[in-house]
Image: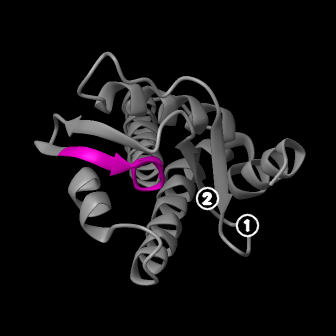
Amino acid sequence: MDSDDMLQAIHTAYGLDCTRLEAAVYGYAAHSLTSTSQSTNGLWSFVSSPDRSVGFWYPMSAQAFNVLVTSNGYKRNGMCAADFGAAVTLTALNHLAWFTNDRLQERVERGEEPDPEELTEPGRLSDQYHRLRAWVLELAEAGHLSPDDIAGFID
């Protein structure tokens, strides 16, 4: 996929959420590495589902990464880049859904009137997470990704 196709696929999958989701993916990826000698800087690619409704980023700077997820204790030396990218994208989507939900609840509790789009944002992000998770599991069942590595990372 060339860069124009990749940008179109990202925008088709995540619309206006794509910029902050992509930033969250890069942040979670960097935070998950066990060694400062490893880096996810450089080129990343994006894989989209056949219908382009979801997709995930993955780093192209290495074939595999040593990761530690401090929130659940998952540790893996040599997690392949595609598994790592799928897991990090799922994590970023999940956290954005919860963050936007919490932010919305705080505004309502303060008596502020959220705009109509804000009311649907947490549900939209949650739906995207579940669609991506289902597609990633399909890829894992087909042997393209490791279900154990992804489940360990995100659970």
| Residues shaded magenta | 76-85
Residue at image mark 1: 52
Q: Is residue 23 left or right of residue 64?
A: right
Amino acid type assigned to the residue bearing label 1 in the image: Arg
Give the residue drawn at x 41%, y 45%: 88
The foreground one among 95 and 84 is 84
Q: Mark 2 falls on what kind of element? A: strand
> 90 above or below 30?
below
The extreme bottom residue here reads 142
- Give the position of the N terminus as an image quadrant: bottom right
Residue 127: where, in percent of width, then height?
52, 64
Residue at image mark 2: 55
The foreground one among 73 and 131 is 73
* Total numbered labels placed on residues in the image: 2
Question: Do callouts 1 and 2 mark residues in contact (Cβ within 8 Å)?
Answer: yes
Residue 4: where, in percent of width, then height?
89, 45
The extreme top residue here reads 36
Residue 53: where, in percent of width, then height?
68, 66
